[in-house]
Image (cartoon, rainbow, N blue to C red):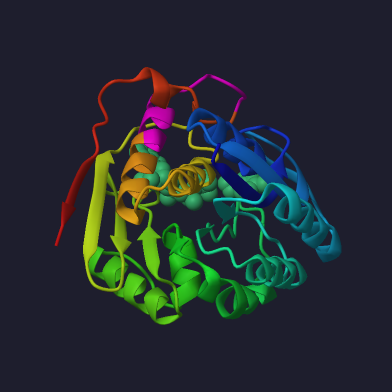
Amino acid sequence: MKRAMTIAGSDSGGGAGIQADLKTFQELKVFGTSALTAVTAQNTLGVQGVFPMEPEAVASQIQSVGEDIGTDALKTGMLFNAGIIQAVSEKIKQFGWEKVVVDPVMIAKGGASLLQQEAVSALKNQLLPLCLIITPNIPEAEVLTGMSIRSMDDKKEAAKRIHALGVKNIVIKGGHDTETNESVDILFDGKEFVFFSTPRIETNNTHGTGCTFSAAITAQLAKGSSVREAVSIAKEFIQAAIANPLGIGNGHGPTNHWAFNSKTESGVISWQE
Ligand SMILES: Nc1ncnc2c1ncn2[C@@H]1O[C@H](COP(=O)(O)OP(=O)(O)OP(=O)(O)O)[C@@H](O)[C@H]1O
Ligand SMILES: Cc1ncc(CO)c(N)n1
């Protein structure tokens, strides 16, 4: 049985964070383990409280999983502060894990901060050089590069700048590009750009899309997919999950983690430059 680990925060509302990751792992048929970085009091309306773990507690959870169960791939989500980033980076190095997906979670949809501002440099200097794939949304890519991203050319330039930070593969997600009727995610591996495009769905139910997407990439990597194949399947997974909402909560509702396994057509168009 292949194993995937998530190092992320808890979303009490069940749509994002560790809950979204474990549901995605389950649907993609890998055994999921977790190390909790923070507890959030959260629902579809917003984040009501953030309670970070001590870095030592995060390190200890990773140690327990690593020394017994091991993992075929892992992802990080909400890391919250520099101490936790350092603890996670040290453990990844200690175990020599290479299939590492970093979702550089910074701000929740309602505006709550999930990463302290002063932790951005720790993320860039300590964790990014250890990761195989990073999956920023547009605002996160802007923070990582210091540039503003308006056009496709800007996205490509941002991907090149993040590659220069030592990251092997960059996926800049298109969910925030609300001007277009396609949601285009671009993958850059240092040489080529590949574009993954699906029709944009008009919906309020996008809570946890980024978590689910990066968890699906991680599950696929654990099963042996190439980076390109993993991103393509993750894009199909999230499209199906957004297109089949569950009607839960009064705000930004969660996506539907069951939908991928019940659908027949992907609707993903991919091309390469
Ligand atoms: N309305 C939409 N229609 C189709 N695809 C979408 C839509 N919104 C997001 N996506 C897709 O969902 C995935 C996540 O992208 P997004 O930019 O929303 O991440 P995010 O902002 O990190 O999410 P979150 O912070 O809510 O977890 C990407 O593959 C993106 O293309
Ligand atoms: C715990 C947690 N992680 C990540 C996100 C980003 O969607 C969120 N809202 N909550």
Q: Position of residue 178 (x, y in %)?
A: 34, 47
In terms of image quadrants, where is residue 193? bottom left
Quadrant location of the C terminus in the rendered image: bottom left
* Residue at horizontal 46 percent and vertical 42 percent from the top: 216
The reply to whether the magenta stretch includes residue 126 is no
Q: Which residues are magenta?
A: 237-250
* Residue at horizontal 70 percent and vertical 72 percent from the top: 90
| Residue 34 seen in the current view | yes
Q: Position of residue 102 (x, y in %)?
A: 53, 60
The reply to whether the magenta stretch includes residue 245 is yes
**Above or below 260: residue 212:** below
Quadrant location of the N terminus in the rendered image: top right
**Above or below 175: residue 94:** below
In terms of image quadrants, where is residue 60? bottom right
The count of marks equals 0
Residue sitting nearer the eye, 121 or 44: 121
Residue sitting nearer the eye, 165 or 27: 27
**Above or below 162: residue 155:** above
In terms of image quadrants, where is residue 55? bottom right
Residue sitting nearer the eye, 263 or 31: 31
Q: Position of residue 29 (x, y in %)?
A: 51, 31
**In this picture, residue 169 sits left or right of residue 271:** right
* Residue at horizontal 41 percent and vertical 74 percent from the top: 162
**Above or below 195: residue 28:** above
| Residue 244 seen in the current view | no
Q: Position of residue 244 (x, y in %)?
A: 41, 22
**In this picture, residue 114 sits left or right of residue 228:** right
